[in-house]
Image (cartoon, coloured by chain):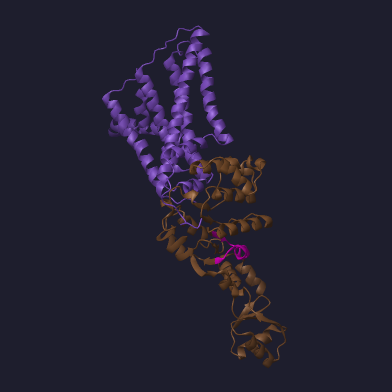
Chain colours: A purple, B brown
Amino acid sequence: MSAPAVDLNRPSIPLGRLVAVEARKVFDTRASRWFSLSILGLVLLVMVLQAFVFVDGLQDLDMFLAFSGNILGYFLPIVLIMLVTSEWGQRTALVTFTLEPRRGRVVAAKLIAGLLLSFAAFALAFLISLLGTFLASSVRGLDVSWSLEGDVIRNFLISNTIAVLVGFALAMLLGNTAAAIVGYFVYTFIVPIVINLLGSFVDWFGDIVPWIEFSSAQTPLVTGDGSLSGEEWAHLATSGTIWLVIPLVVGILRLLRREVK
Amino acid sequence: MIAVEHLSKTYGSYQALNDVSFVCRPGTVTGFLGPNGAGKSTAMRIMTGLTPASSGVATIGGVAYRDIPNPSSQVGVLLDASAQHGGRTGREVLTIAAKTMGLPKSRVDEMLALVGLTPSEAKRRVRNYSLGMRQRLGLAQTLLGDPSVLILDEPANGLDPAGIHWMRSLLRSFAEKGGTVLLSSHLLHEIEVIADEIIVIGHGRIVAQGTKDELLKGSGTFVRALDPSALVNALVSAGIESHVSGAGLATDATAEQVGRAAAAAGVVLLELRAAESANLEEMFLQLTSDTQRDALATEGARA
Protein backbone atom coordinates (compact mmCIF):
# COMPACT_ATOMS: atom_id res chain seq x y z
CA MET A 1 0.00 0.00 0.00
CA SER A 2 3.00 2.30 0.18
CA ALA A 3 2.89 2.41 -3.65
CA PRO A 4 1.15 5.41 -5.23
CA ALA A 5 -2.34 5.88 -3.89
CA VAL A 6 -4.12 5.10 -7.12
CA ASP A 7 -3.22 2.87 -10.03
CA LEU A 8 -4.34 4.42 -13.31
CA ASN A 9 -3.50 1.30 -15.30
CA ARG A 10 -6.14 -0.89 -13.77
CA PRO A 11 -8.87 -2.04 -16.15
CA SER A 12 -12.06 -0.06 -15.80
CA ILE A 13 -15.36 -1.79 -15.14
CA PRO A 14 -16.54 -3.52 -18.33
CA LEU A 15 -20.03 -2.57 -19.48
CA GLY A 16 -21.11 -6.23 -19.40
CA ARG A 17 -20.44 -6.41 -15.68
CA LEU A 18 -22.51 -3.28 -15.08
CA VAL A 19 -25.35 -4.76 -17.14
CA ALA A 20 -25.24 -7.99 -15.11
CA VAL A 21 -25.36 -6.01 -11.85
CA GLU A 22 -28.28 -3.89 -13.04
CA ALA A 23 -30.19 -6.99 -14.14
CA ARG A 24 -29.55 -8.50 -10.72
CA LYS A 25 -31.13 -5.44 -9.06
CA VAL A 26 -34.46 -6.26 -10.73
CA PHE A 27 -34.70 -9.45 -8.69
CA ASP A 28 -32.75 -8.87 -5.50
CA THR A 29 -35.47 -7.61 -3.18
CA ARG A 30 -38.57 -9.49 -2.19
CA ALA A 31 -40.81 -6.75 -3.62
CA SER A 32 -39.06 -6.52 -6.98
CA ARG A 33 -38.88 -10.31 -7.35
CA TRP A 34 -42.59 -10.69 -6.66
CA PHE A 35 -43.53 -7.86 -8.95
CA SER A 36 -41.61 -9.40 -11.84
CA LEU A 37 -43.07 -12.84 -11.17
CA SER A 38 -46.58 -11.39 -10.85
CA ILE A 39 -46.39 -9.96 -14.35
CA LEU A 40 -45.56 -13.40 -15.66
CA GLY A 41 -48.32 -14.91 -13.52
CA LEU A 42 -50.83 -12.42 -14.91
CA VAL A 43 -49.85 -13.29 -18.49
CA LEU A 44 -50.33 -16.99 -17.62
CA LEU A 45 -53.68 -16.35 -15.95
CA VAL A 46 -55.06 -14.37 -18.87
CA MET A 47 -53.80 -17.06 -21.24
CA VAL A 48 -55.73 -19.73 -19.33
CA LEU A 49 -58.88 -17.58 -19.30
CA GLN A 50 -58.46 -16.82 -22.96
CA ALA A 51 -58.02 -20.48 -23.84
CA PHE A 52 -60.92 -21.83 -21.79
CA VAL A 53 -63.35 -19.01 -20.94
CA PHE A 54 -63.20 -16.29 -23.62
CA VAL A 55 -65.73 -16.58 -26.46
CA ASP A 56 -64.80 -18.69 -29.39
CA GLY A 57 -62.79 -16.81 -32.00
CA LEU A 58 -60.20 -15.21 -29.74
CA GLN A 59 -57.97 -18.28 -29.62
CA ASP A 60 -55.70 -17.81 -32.61
CA LEU A 61 -51.97 -17.57 -31.91
CA ASP A 62 -51.83 -13.90 -32.91
CA MET A 63 -54.70 -13.13 -30.52
CA PHE A 64 -52.84 -14.75 -27.64
CA LEU A 65 -49.80 -12.72 -28.57
CA ALA A 66 -51.87 -9.51 -28.70
CA PHE A 67 -53.35 -10.10 -25.23
CA SER A 68 -50.06 -10.97 -23.56
CA GLY A 69 -48.43 -8.03 -25.35
CA ASN A 70 -51.09 -5.78 -23.84
CA ILE A 71 -50.35 -6.97 -20.32
CA LEU A 72 -46.61 -6.59 -20.79
CA GLY A 73 -47.23 -3.13 -22.26
CA TYR A 74 -48.84 -2.04 -18.98
CA PHE A 75 -46.47 -3.63 -16.50
CA LEU A 76 -43.02 -4.13 -18.01
CA PRO A 77 -42.41 -0.35 -18.16
CA ILE A 78 -42.91 -0.27 -14.39
CA VAL A 79 -40.00 -2.72 -13.98
CA LEU A 80 -37.76 -0.34 -15.92
CA ILE A 81 -39.15 2.67 -14.06
CA MET A 82 -38.27 1.08 -10.72
CA LEU A 83 -34.81 0.09 -11.92
CA VAL A 84 -34.12 3.81 -12.40
CA THR A 85 -36.16 5.50 -9.68
CA SER A 86 -35.34 3.17 -6.79
CA GLU A 87 -31.79 4.52 -6.98
CA TRP A 88 -33.19 7.89 -5.93
CA GLY A 89 -36.01 6.69 -3.67
CA GLN A 90 -33.70 4.39 -1.72
CA ARG A 91 -30.76 6.77 -2.21
CA THR A 92 -28.58 3.95 -3.54
CA ALA A 93 -27.52 6.33 -6.35
CA LEU A 94 -24.92 7.53 -3.86
CA VAL A 95 -23.30 4.07 -3.94
CA THR A 96 -24.03 3.27 -7.59
CA PHE A 97 -22.35 6.42 -8.85
CA THR A 98 -19.42 6.01 -6.49
CA LEU A 99 -18.82 2.51 -7.80
CA GLU A 100 -19.02 3.81 -11.39
CA PRO A 101 -18.75 7.61 -11.54
CA ARG A 102 -19.09 7.68 -15.30
CA ARG A 103 -22.84 8.01 -15.09
CA GLY A 104 -23.45 7.56 -18.80
CA ARG A 105 -22.21 3.98 -18.48
CA VAL A 106 -24.57 3.29 -15.60
CA VAL A 107 -27.49 4.66 -17.64
CA ALA A 108 -26.46 2.55 -20.63
CA ALA A 109 -26.16 -0.53 -18.39
CA LYS A 110 -29.64 0.06 -16.95
CA LEU A 111 -31.14 0.53 -20.40
CA ILE A 112 -29.43 -2.57 -21.81
CA ALA A 113 -30.38 -4.67 -18.77
CA GLY A 114 -33.97 -3.42 -18.99
CA LEU A 115 -34.20 -4.20 -22.70
CA LEU A 116 -32.64 -7.65 -22.31
CA LEU A 117 -35.10 -8.52 -19.55
CA SER A 118 -37.95 -7.15 -21.68
CA PHE A 119 -36.89 -9.33 -24.60
CA ALA A 120 -36.75 -12.32 -22.27
CA ALA A 121 -40.29 -11.45 -21.17
CA PHE A 122 -41.39 -11.16 -24.82
CA ALA A 123 -39.94 -14.62 -25.50
CA LEU A 124 -41.78 -16.04 -22.49
CA ALA A 125 -45.00 -14.35 -23.63
CA PHE A 126 -44.53 -15.98 -27.02
CA LEU A 127 -44.09 -19.41 -25.43
CA ILE A 128 -47.15 -18.83 -23.26
CA SER A 129 -49.12 -17.82 -26.37
CA LEU A 130 -48.07 -21.04 -28.10
CA LEU A 131 -49.20 -22.98 -25.03
CA GLY A 132 -52.53 -21.12 -24.97
CA THR A 133 -53.18 -21.85 -28.62
CA PHE A 134 -52.31 -25.49 -28.06
CA LEU A 135 -54.62 -25.78 -25.04
CA ALA A 136 -57.50 -24.06 -26.83
CA SER A 137 -57.25 -26.42 -29.75
CA SER A 138 -56.41 -29.70 -28.02
CA VAL A 139 -58.28 -29.46 -24.71
CA ARG A 140 -61.18 -27.16 -25.61
CA GLY A 141 -61.28 -28.51 -29.16
CA LEU A 142 -61.50 -25.13 -30.89
CA ASP A 143 -60.51 -24.54 -34.47
CA VAL A 144 -57.50 -22.24 -34.11
CA SER A 145 -55.09 -20.59 -36.49
CA TRP A 146 -51.40 -21.09 -35.85
CA SER A 147 -50.35 -18.69 -38.57
CA LEU A 148 -48.28 -15.71 -37.56
CA GLU A 149 -47.36 -12.97 -40.02
CA GLY A 150 -43.84 -11.61 -39.79
CA ASP A 151 -45.40 -8.14 -39.49
CA VAL A 152 -47.30 -9.18 -36.36
CA ILE A 153 -44.12 -10.30 -34.60
CA ARG A 154 -42.30 -7.17 -35.71
CA ASN A 155 -45.13 -4.93 -34.48
CA PHE A 156 -45.34 -6.78 -31.18
CA LEU A 157 -41.65 -6.13 -30.65
CA ILE A 158 -41.84 -2.48 -31.75
CA SER A 159 -44.86 -1.50 -29.66
CA ASN A 160 -43.65 -3.27 -26.52
CA THR A 161 -40.15 -1.91 -26.88
CA ILE A 162 -41.62 1.57 -27.26
CA ALA A 163 -43.62 1.00 -24.06
CA VAL A 164 -40.59 0.03 -21.98
CA LEU A 165 -38.53 2.85 -23.47
CA VAL A 166 -41.23 5.38 -22.59
CA GLY A 167 -41.19 4.03 -19.02
CA PHE A 168 -37.42 4.34 -18.89
CA ALA A 169 -37.45 7.87 -20.32
CA LEU A 170 -40.10 9.07 -17.85
CA ALA A 171 -38.20 7.51 -14.96
CA MET A 172 -35.03 9.29 -16.02
CA LEU A 173 -36.91 12.54 -16.43
CA LEU A 174 -38.97 12.47 -13.22
CA GLY A 175 -36.66 10.47 -10.92
CA ASN A 176 -39.51 9.37 -8.68
CA THR A 177 -41.32 6.02 -8.77
CA ALA A 178 -44.85 7.25 -8.13
CA ALA A 179 -44.52 10.23 -10.45
CA ALA A 180 -43.06 8.11 -13.23
CA ILE A 181 -45.77 5.41 -12.98
CA VAL A 182 -48.57 7.97 -12.87
CA GLY A 183 -46.80 9.84 -15.64
CA TYR A 184 -46.66 6.69 -17.72
CA PHE A 185 -50.41 6.14 -17.50
CA VAL A 186 -51.21 9.81 -18.06
CA TYR A 187 -48.95 9.54 -21.07
CA THR A 188 -50.66 6.50 -22.52
CA PHE A 189 -54.27 7.28 -21.63
CA ILE A 190 -54.90 10.94 -20.93
CA VAL A 191 -52.53 12.76 -23.25
CA PRO A 192 -53.97 11.03 -26.38
CA ILE A 193 -57.53 11.89 -25.32
CA VAL A 194 -56.68 15.53 -24.69
CA ILE A 195 -54.79 15.91 -27.95
CA ASN A 196 -57.51 14.21 -29.99
CA LEU A 197 -60.21 16.26 -28.27
CA LEU A 198 -58.31 19.44 -29.00
CA GLY A 199 -57.86 18.27 -32.57
CA SER A 200 -61.59 17.78 -33.06
CA PHE A 201 -62.34 21.37 -32.05
CA VAL A 202 -59.45 23.19 -33.65
CA ASP A 203 -59.26 22.55 -37.38
CA TRP A 204 -55.63 23.30 -38.05
CA PHE A 205 -54.63 21.34 -34.96
CA GLY A 206 -56.72 18.39 -36.10
CA ASP A 207 -54.59 18.19 -39.24
CA ILE A 208 -51.35 17.77 -37.31
CA VAL A 209 -52.68 15.44 -34.61
CA PRO A 210 -51.61 12.26 -36.47
CA TRP A 211 -48.08 13.62 -36.60
CA ILE A 212 -47.77 14.48 -32.92
CA GLU A 213 -50.01 11.98 -31.11
CA PHE A 214 -47.89 8.97 -30.20
CA SER A 215 -50.66 6.64 -29.09
CA SER A 216 -52.73 6.92 -32.31
CA ALA A 217 -49.52 6.60 -34.29
CA GLN A 218 -48.98 3.19 -32.67
CA THR A 219 -52.52 1.97 -33.38
CA PRO A 220 -51.65 0.50 -36.82
CA LEU A 221 -49.09 -1.68 -35.03
CA VAL A 222 -51.79 -3.54 -33.13
CA THR A 223 -54.78 -3.38 -35.48
CA GLY A 224 -55.58 -4.55 -39.01
CA ASP A 225 -53.19 -6.78 -40.89
CA GLY A 226 -50.17 -5.20 -39.22
CA SER A 227 -48.68 -3.56 -42.29
CA LEU A 228 -47.91 0.14 -42.10
CA SER A 229 -47.97 2.66 -44.93
CA GLY A 230 -45.10 5.06 -45.47
CA GLU A 231 -47.12 7.86 -43.93
CA GLU A 232 -47.94 5.75 -40.88
CA TRP A 233 -44.23 5.07 -40.34
CA ALA A 234 -43.64 8.81 -40.63
CA HIS A 235 -46.35 9.50 -38.00
CA LEU A 236 -44.62 7.01 -35.71
CA ALA A 237 -41.27 8.67 -36.28
CA THR A 238 -42.38 12.27 -35.66
CA SER A 239 -44.62 11.57 -32.68
CA GLY A 240 -41.99 9.19 -31.28
CA THR A 241 -39.38 11.92 -31.46
CA ILE A 242 -41.61 14.25 -29.46
CA TRP A 243 -42.84 11.81 -26.84
CA LEU A 244 -39.95 9.36 -26.54
CA VAL A 245 -36.65 10.61 -27.92
CA ILE A 246 -36.79 14.13 -26.49
CA PRO A 247 -37.79 13.07 -22.93
CA LEU A 248 -35.14 10.35 -23.01
CA VAL A 249 -32.39 12.74 -24.09
CA VAL A 250 -33.45 15.42 -21.58
CA GLY A 251 -33.69 12.77 -18.84
CA ILE A 252 -30.19 11.46 -19.56
CA LEU A 253 -28.68 14.96 -19.72
CA ARG A 254 -30.36 15.81 -16.44
CA LEU A 255 -28.98 12.72 -14.74
CA LEU A 256 -25.47 13.33 -16.03
CA ARG A 257 -25.45 16.77 -14.44
CA ARG A 258 -27.56 16.44 -11.36
CA GLU A 259 -26.09 16.42 -7.91
CA VAL A 260 -26.22 13.02 -6.21
CA LYS A 261 -27.19 13.26 -2.55
CA MET B 1 -3.02 11.30 -1.15
CA ILE B 2 -6.06 13.53 -1.29
CA ALA B 3 -5.56 17.13 -2.40
CA VAL B 4 -8.27 19.74 -2.25
CA GLU B 5 -7.42 23.10 -3.78
CA HIS B 6 -9.46 26.29 -3.48
CA LEU B 7 -12.73 24.41 -3.48
CA SER B 8 -15.87 26.56 -3.51
CA LYS B 9 -19.49 25.61 -3.89
CA THR B 10 -22.47 27.92 -4.01
CA TYR B 11 -26.14 27.07 -4.11
CA GLY B 12 -27.87 30.18 -5.35
CA SER B 13 -26.80 32.83 -2.86
CA TYR B 14 -25.77 30.30 -0.21
CA GLN B 15 -22.07 29.56 -0.04
CA ALA B 16 -21.62 25.98 1.15
CA LEU B 17 -17.85 25.94 0.65
CA ASN B 18 -15.57 28.93 0.50
CA ASP B 19 -12.02 28.48 -0.82
CA VAL B 20 -11.29 25.25 1.00
CA SER B 21 -7.80 23.75 0.60
CA PHE B 22 -6.16 20.88 2.43
CA VAL B 23 -4.13 17.74 1.90
CA CYS B 24 -4.45 14.25 3.39
CA ARG B 25 -1.20 12.29 3.40
CA PRO B 26 -0.63 8.55 3.17
CA GLY B 27 -0.02 6.97 6.56
CA THR B 28 -2.20 9.43 8.42
CA VAL B 29 -5.76 9.70 9.59
CA THR B 30 -7.13 13.16 8.88
CA GLY B 31 -10.13 14.29 10.86
CA PHE B 32 -12.57 16.66 9.21
CA LEU B 33 -14.29 18.41 12.05
CA GLY B 34 -17.18 20.79 11.94
CA PRO B 35 -20.73 21.32 13.13
CA ASN B 36 -23.62 19.99 11.10
CA GLY B 37 -24.06 22.02 7.94
CA ALA B 38 -20.47 23.29 7.94
CA GLY B 39 -19.79 21.84 4.48
CA LYS B 40 -18.07 18.54 5.31
CA SER B 41 -20.44 16.36 3.34
CA THR B 42 -20.52 18.76 0.41
CA ALA B 43 -16.72 18.69 0.26
CA MET B 44 -16.70 14.90 0.38
CA ARG B 45 -19.33 14.62 -2.35
CA ILE B 46 -17.25 16.93 -4.54
CA MET B 47 -14.13 14.81 -3.91
CA THR B 48 -15.99 11.74 -5.15
CA GLY B 49 -17.54 13.38 -8.19
CA LEU B 50 -21.12 13.27 -6.95
CA THR B 51 -21.47 17.03 -6.73
CA PRO B 52 -19.86 19.42 -9.20
CA ALA B 53 -17.69 22.13 -7.63
CA SER B 54 -18.38 25.77 -8.43
CA SER B 55 -14.64 26.32 -8.55
CA GLY B 56 -11.47 24.61 -7.40
CA VAL B 57 -10.37 21.00 -7.77
CA ALA B 58 -10.20 17.88 -5.66
CA THR B 59 -7.86 15.07 -6.64
CA ILE B 60 -6.99 11.66 -5.26
CA GLY B 61 -3.52 10.41 -6.18
CA GLY B 62 -3.27 13.32 -8.58
CA VAL B 63 -6.42 12.68 -10.60
CA ALA B 64 -10.13 13.39 -10.28
CA TYR B 65 -12.12 10.56 -8.71
CA ARG B 66 -14.06 9.92 -11.91
CA ASP B 67 -10.80 9.36 -13.81
CA ILE B 68 -9.71 6.52 -11.52
CA PRO B 69 -10.39 3.18 -13.20
CA ASN B 70 -12.66 0.96 -11.10
CA PRO B 71 -12.44 3.65 -8.40
CA SER B 72 -14.03 1.77 -5.52
CA SER B 73 -11.30 -0.86 -5.69
CA GLN B 74 -8.80 1.90 -4.92
CA VAL B 75 -10.72 4.48 -2.90
CA GLY B 76 -13.19 3.32 -0.29
CA VAL B 77 -16.06 5.79 0.04
CA LEU B 78 -18.80 5.83 2.67
CA LEU B 79 -20.89 8.98 2.50
CA ASP B 80 -24.12 7.83 4.12
CA ALA B 81 -24.58 4.43 5.69
CA SER B 82 -28.35 4.86 5.50
CA ALA B 83 -28.30 5.22 1.72
CA GLN B 84 -28.95 1.55 1.09
CA HIS B 85 -31.95 -0.23 -0.37
CA GLY B 86 -33.95 -1.30 2.67
CA GLY B 87 -35.23 -4.39 0.89
CA ARG B 88 -31.80 -5.85 0.18
CA THR B 89 -30.02 -8.08 2.64
CA GLY B 90 -26.69 -6.95 4.01
CA ARG B 91 -24.97 -9.69 2.03
CA GLU B 92 -26.73 -8.60 -1.18
CA VAL B 93 -25.54 -5.02 -0.68
CA LEU B 94 -21.95 -6.24 -0.52
CA THR B 95 -22.48 -8.72 -3.36
CA ILE B 96 -23.64 -5.95 -5.70
CA ALA B 97 -20.57 -3.88 -4.86
CA ALA B 98 -18.24 -6.89 -5.18
CA LYS B 99 -19.71 -7.87 -8.54
CA THR B 100 -19.40 -4.32 -9.84
CA MET B 101 -15.76 -4.20 -8.77
CA GLY B 102 -15.14 -7.67 -10.18
CA LEU B 103 -14.22 -9.30 -6.87
CA PRO B 104 -14.76 -12.93 -5.90
CA LYS B 105 -17.69 -13.85 -3.69
CA SER B 106 -15.32 -14.98 -0.93
CA ARG B 107 -14.37 -11.33 -0.42
CA VAL B 108 -17.92 -10.60 0.77
CA ASP B 109 -17.63 -13.21 3.53
CA GLU B 110 -14.21 -11.91 4.54
CA MET B 111 -15.52 -8.37 4.91
CA LEU B 112 -18.63 -9.46 6.80
CA ALA B 113 -16.34 -11.26 9.25
CA LEU B 114 -13.99 -8.27 9.45
CA VAL B 115 -16.72 -5.83 10.47
CA GLY B 116 -18.35 -8.31 12.81
CA LEU B 117 -21.64 -8.97 11.04
CA THR B 118 -22.69 -12.57 11.68
CA PRO B 119 -24.02 -14.78 8.85
CA SER B 120 -27.53 -14.52 10.26
CA GLU B 121 -27.29 -10.72 10.45
CA ALA B 122 -26.00 -10.64 6.88
CA LYS B 123 -29.18 -12.45 5.77
CA ARG B 124 -31.42 -9.79 7.30
CA ARG B 125 -32.79 -6.92 5.28
CA VAL B 126 -31.00 -3.62 5.71
CA ARG B 127 -34.27 -1.92 6.72
CA ASN B 128 -34.08 -3.94 9.94
CA TYR B 129 -30.51 -2.87 10.69
CA SER B 130 -29.62 -0.44 13.45
CA LEU B 131 -27.57 2.59 12.40
CA GLY B 132 -24.52 0.95 13.97
CA MET B 133 -25.00 -2.18 11.83
CA ARG B 134 -25.43 -0.03 8.73
CA GLN B 135 -22.16 1.71 9.54
CA ARG B 136 -20.42 -1.65 9.83
CA LEU B 137 -21.95 -2.76 6.55
CA GLY B 138 -20.91 0.52 4.94
CA LEU B 139 -17.35 0.10 6.22
CA ALA B 140 -17.33 -3.46 4.87
CA GLN B 141 -18.32 -2.07 1.49
CA THR B 142 -15.56 0.56 1.50
CA LEU B 143 -12.96 -2.09 2.40
CA LEU B 144 -14.12 -4.69 -0.16
CA GLY B 145 -11.72 -3.68 -2.89
CA ASP B 146 -8.68 -3.38 -0.58
CA PRO B 147 -8.36 0.37 -1.24
CA SER B 148 -5.42 2.58 -0.32
CA VAL B 149 -7.59 5.63 0.43
CA LEU B 150 -10.68 5.90 2.62
CA ILE B 151 -13.20 8.75 2.60
CA LEU B 152 -15.74 8.34 5.40
CA ASP B 153 -18.52 10.75 6.31
CA GLU B 154 -19.50 10.48 9.99
CA PRO B 155 -18.57 6.79 10.21
CA ALA B 156 -18.80 6.73 14.00
CA ASN B 157 -22.44 7.85 13.99
CA GLY B 158 -24.56 5.23 15.65
CA LEU B 159 -21.65 3.04 16.72
CA ASP B 160 -21.56 2.08 20.37
CA PRO B 161 -18.39 2.80 22.40
CA ALA B 162 -17.02 -0.68 21.61
CA GLY B 163 -17.77 -0.08 17.93
CA ILE B 164 -15.97 3.26 18.00
CA HIS B 165 -12.98 1.62 19.66
CA TRP B 166 -13.02 -1.12 17.01
CA MET B 167 -13.22 1.42 14.18
CA ARG B 168 -10.41 3.45 15.67
CA SER B 169 -8.05 0.45 15.66
CA LEU B 170 -9.20 -0.52 12.18
CA LEU B 171 -8.41 2.93 10.78
CA ARG B 172 -5.20 3.13 12.77
CA SER B 173 -3.84 -0.10 11.29
CA PHE B 174 -5.06 0.97 7.84
CA ALA B 175 -3.02 4.17 8.14
CA GLU B 176 -0.01 2.34 9.58
CA LYS B 177 0.07 0.18 6.44
CA GLY B 178 0.41 3.40 4.44
CA GLY B 179 -3.24 4.10 3.72
CA THR B 180 -4.75 7.58 3.58
CA VAL B 181 -7.85 8.19 5.68
CA LEU B 182 -10.16 11.19 5.70
CA LEU B 183 -13.07 10.98 8.09
CA SER B 184 -15.53 13.59 9.21
CA SER B 185 -17.31 14.12 12.46
CA HIS B 186 -19.23 16.81 14.26
CA LEU B 187 -17.89 15.54 17.58
CA LEU B 188 -14.54 16.86 18.75
CA HIS B 189 -13.90 13.90 21.00
CA GLU B 190 -14.27 11.37 18.18
CA ILE B 191 -11.78 13.24 16.04
CA GLU B 192 -9.41 13.66 19.00
CA VAL B 193 -9.17 9.93 19.60
CA ILE B 194 -8.83 8.86 15.95
CA ALA B 195 -7.09 11.57 13.94
CA ASP B 196 -3.45 12.56 13.50
CA GLU B 197 -4.26 15.66 11.49
CA ILE B 198 -7.29 17.83 12.10
CA ILE B 199 -9.09 20.19 9.76
CA VAL B 200 -11.75 22.35 11.38
CA ILE B 201 -14.43 23.72 9.10
CA GLY B 202 -17.25 26.12 9.86
CA HIS B 203 -19.62 28.00 7.56
CA GLY B 204 -17.84 26.51 4.56
CA ARG B 205 -14.42 27.87 5.55
CA ILE B 206 -11.45 26.16 7.09
CA VAL B 207 -10.89 27.81 10.44
CA ALA B 208 -7.97 25.73 11.67
CA GLN B 209 -5.79 22.90 10.48
CA GLY B 210 -2.71 21.14 11.73
CA THR B 211 -1.55 18.09 13.58
CA LYS B 212 -3.54 17.07 16.59
CA ASP B 213 -0.69 18.05 18.90
CA GLU B 214 -0.42 21.52 17.42
CA LEU B 215 -4.11 22.17 17.68
CA LEU B 216 -4.68 20.63 21.07
CA LYS B 217 -1.56 22.05 22.74
CA GLY B 218 -3.30 25.29 23.30
CA SER B 219 -1.55 28.38 24.56
CA GLY B 220 -1.93 30.67 27.51
CA THR B 221 -3.22 30.02 30.96
CA PHE B 222 -6.38 28.91 32.63
CA VAL B 223 -7.18 30.54 35.97
CA ARG B 224 -10.01 30.22 38.44
CA ALA B 225 -10.56 32.39 41.49
CA LEU B 226 -12.79 32.33 44.53
CA ASP B 227 -14.17 35.70 43.46
CA PRO B 228 -14.32 35.78 39.64
CA SER B 229 -15.16 39.47 39.29
CA ALA B 230 -12.26 40.44 41.56
CA LEU B 231 -10.02 38.34 39.33
CA VAL B 232 -11.30 40.07 36.17
CA ASN B 233 -10.59 43.46 37.76
CA ALA B 234 -7.13 42.34 38.81
CA LEU B 235 -6.33 41.12 35.28
CA VAL B 236 -7.71 44.26 33.65
CA SER B 237 -5.65 46.52 35.88
CA ALA B 238 -2.56 44.43 35.05
CA GLY B 239 -3.35 44.87 31.35
CA ILE B 240 -4.07 41.17 30.77
CA GLU B 241 -6.87 40.26 28.40
CA SER B 242 -9.03 37.33 29.34
CA HIS B 243 -12.27 35.64 28.51
CA VAL B 244 -14.61 33.29 30.29
CA SER B 245 -13.70 29.62 29.92
CA GLY B 246 -15.79 27.13 31.83
CA ALA B 247 -15.76 28.05 35.51
CA GLY B 248 -12.71 30.28 35.14
CA LEU B 249 -10.89 32.57 32.72
CA ALA B 250 -8.56 31.87 29.83
CA THR B 251 -5.80 34.32 28.99
CA ASP B 252 -2.83 34.52 26.68
CA ALA B 253 -0.58 35.58 29.52
CA THR B 254 1.83 33.23 31.33
CA ALA B 255 0.93 31.62 34.64
CA GLU B 256 3.49 33.85 36.34
CA GLN B 257 1.95 37.05 34.98
CA VAL B 258 -1.52 35.96 36.04
CA GLY B 259 -0.30 34.81 39.46
CA ARG B 260 1.47 38.12 40.08
CA ALA B 261 -1.60 40.13 39.02
CA ALA B 262 -3.81 38.08 41.34
CA ALA B 263 -1.36 38.33 44.24
CA ALA B 264 -1.06 42.10 43.79
CA ALA B 265 -4.85 42.43 44.06
CA GLY B 266 -5.11 39.89 46.85
CA VAL B 267 -7.37 37.58 44.86
CA VAL B 268 -7.57 33.99 46.10
CA LEU B 269 -6.85 31.55 43.25
CA LEU B 270 -8.29 28.05 43.17
CA GLU B 271 -6.65 26.95 39.93
CA LEU B 272 -3.77 28.26 37.81
CA ARG B 273 -2.42 26.12 35.00
CA ALA B 274 -1.52 25.96 31.32
CA ALA B 275 -4.63 25.87 29.14
CA GLU B 276 -5.33 22.40 27.75
CA SER B 277 -7.28 21.76 24.61
CA ALA B 278 -9.24 24.89 25.40
CA ASN B 279 -8.26 26.50 22.13
CA LEU B 280 -9.75 23.91 19.84
CA GLU B 281 -12.67 23.13 22.07
CA GLU B 282 -13.65 26.75 22.42
CA MET B 283 -13.22 27.52 18.78
CA PHE B 284 -15.38 24.53 18.03
CA LEU B 285 -18.03 25.45 20.57
CA GLN B 286 -18.13 28.95 19.18
CA LEU B 287 -18.56 27.60 15.67
CA THR B 288 -21.25 25.27 16.82
CA SER B 289 -23.17 27.83 18.78
CA ASP B 290 -23.07 30.22 15.84
CA THR B 291 -24.83 27.72 13.65
CA GLN B 292 -26.96 25.87 16.10
CA ARG B 293 -30.11 26.69 17.90
CA ASP B 294 -28.74 26.14 21.38
CA ALA B 295 -26.92 29.47 21.09
CA LEU B 296 -29.92 31.17 22.65
CA ALA B 297 -30.23 28.56 25.37
CA THR B 298 -26.55 28.94 26.29
CA GLU B 299 -26.82 32.70 26.47
CA GLY B 300 -29.96 32.36 28.54
CA ALA B 301 -28.10 30.21 31.02
CA ARG B 302 -25.27 32.72 31.28
CA ALA B 303 -27.54 35.65 32.01
Q: Position of residue B222 (x, y in %)?
A: 65, 80
**Left or right of residue A256, residue B103 in this image:** right
**Left or right of residue A7, residue A38 in this image:** right
Q: From the image, which quarter does the C terminus of chain B lie in?
A: bottom right
Name the one closer to the observer, B148 or B290.
B148
Whether residue B236 is visible, yes or no, is yes
Residue positioned 50% across, 66% down in the render = B203
Segment colored magenta: B182-197
**Left or right of residue A226, residue A85 in this image:** right
Residue positioned 62% across, 73% down in the render = B277
Whether residue B13 is visible, yes or no, is no
Name the one closer to the observer, A198 or A213.
A213
Query: Is residue A134 placed above or below A71 in the rendered structure?
Result: above
Q: Position of residue A71 (x, y in %)?
A: 48, 25
Q: How many marks?
A: 0
Is residue B211 part of the magenta span, yes or no? no
Q: Position of residue B123 (x, y in %)?
A: 63, 39
Name the one closer to the observer, A58 or B226.
B226
Q: Position of residue B7 (x, y in %)?
A: 43, 62
In this view, the residue farthest toward the bottom is: B264
Residue positioned 47% across, 47% down in the render = A97
Residue positioned 48% across, 23% down in the render = A124
Query: Is residue A64 placed above or below A174 in the rendered structure?
Result: above
